[in-house]
Amino acid sequence: MTINDVIWKQPFVDKLAFKHHVSIEEVEETLRSHPLIRRVAKGHIHNENVYAAYAHIRNGRYLIVFFINKKGNKALPISARDMDHSERRYYGKQKQTH
């Protein structure tokens, strides 16, 4: 999946900054860096599922970004945080096989 654009909503931007200490720039880098993407939940709207994007970004952080895939491959980030131990292990194994 290729992300063509990122849609931002203020409540999610605030949550990223205050709860998870993740910046808009870090989320956009994650989504545009050819991340490992997998569907994590079926969306409430047809063809708008929730996905997780895993990436190791330039500043050294291993981030996971949860987003809704909107029409036109536009991502609406709803959360982002540092990967936990099991997510980093999953990411490492998947990167080795791809």
Image: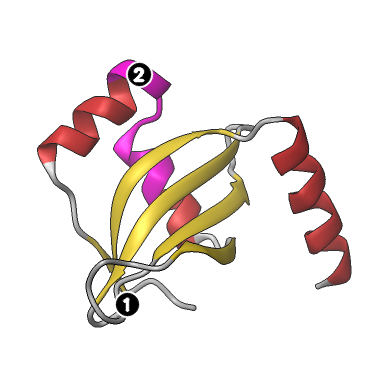
Q: Amino acid at mark 2?
A: Lys
Q: Is residue 82 left or right of residue 9?
A: right
Task: From the image, tell me which residue sits under label 1.
Answer: 73
Percent coordinates x, y for residue 12 in the rendering: 22, 37
Residue at position x 42%, y 40% from top? 26
Percent coordinates x, y for residue 5 in the rendering: 27, 68
Dot 2 or dot 1, earlier in sequence = 2
Q: Amino acid at mark 1?
A: Asn
Q: Nearer the viewer, residue 68 or 95?
A: 68
Q: Residue furthest left?
A: 10
Q: How is the image coloured?
A: secondary structure
State which region is magenta: 18-28
Membership of 33 in magenta stretch: no
Q: Residues within 10 Å of mark 1 (few under 14, many from 20)?
A: some
Query: Is the C terminus in the top left, top right, bottom left or bottom right quadrant?
Result: bottom right
Determine which of the numbered discs, if any, sits on residue 19 in the image. Answer: 2
Residue 88, by quadrant, is: top right
Residue at position x 40%, y 45% from top? 27
Percent coordinates x, y for residue 36 in the rendering: 63, 62
Q: Nearer the viewer, residue 98 or 84?
A: 84
Residue 59, by quadrant, is: top right
Q: Is residue 87 left or right of residue 53?
A: right
